[in-house]
Amino acid sequence: MRHEEFIGQVQDRARLPGWGDAERASRATLETLGERVPEGLADNLAAQLPHEIGEHLRRTEVYGGAGSGERFDKHDFVERVAVRAGTSEARAAFLARSVLEVVDDATQGSITTKVRHALPPDIRELVSSGSSG
């Protein structure tokens, strides 16, 4: 999948008005995911995505000084996405589900199964529910 196709799918599934909104949602979600999963797993997932998209996983901000593989729950995950995307937490949960659904499609589920297993059940729910869940 190419970068343009990935962002276009995020824009469509998340019902976003513009390309920049889809870029922001993708960046916010993947940077947060990169903080939560172990670095090696984030790198493996990034390698399966278009380069520009995968870099969001690799250049994760050190949120509060903790770095990658940090332990936090669904509430914290959604809150971080909301802050990064500049939106409400309810909207951020939907955006994250939409982005993660496109990630699953882009990787044909190959690495996202490993990502799911690396996450606690409450965050795993975000990965599994998709844009219609």
Image (cartoon, rainbow, N blue to C red):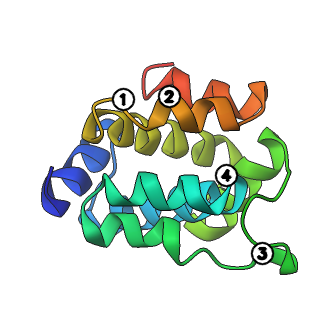
Q: Earlier in the sequence, mark 3 or mark 1?
A: 3
Q: Earlier in the sequence, mark 1 or mark 4?
A: 4
For marks 2 and 3 on the same chain, the one whose residue lies earlier in the sequence: 3
Mark 4: amino acid? Val
Q: Amino acid at mark 1?
A: Gly
Horizontal side, residue 23 vs residue 60: left or right: left
Specify which label sits upstream in the sequence, 3 or 4: 4
Q: Gap between marks 2 and 1, in whole Å? A: 6 Å
* Residue found at x 41% / y 72%: 55
Please name the residue shown 48% across and 62% down the image.
43
Mark identifier at residue 63: 3
Q: Which residue is mark 1?
A: 109
Q: Of the residues shown, which amino acid type is indicated by label 2?
A: Thr
Q: Which residue is mark 2?
A: 113
- Sequence-wise, the earlier of marks 2 and 4 is 4
Point out the residue furthest to the front here: 40
Q: CA distance from mark 1 to mark 4?
A: 16 Å
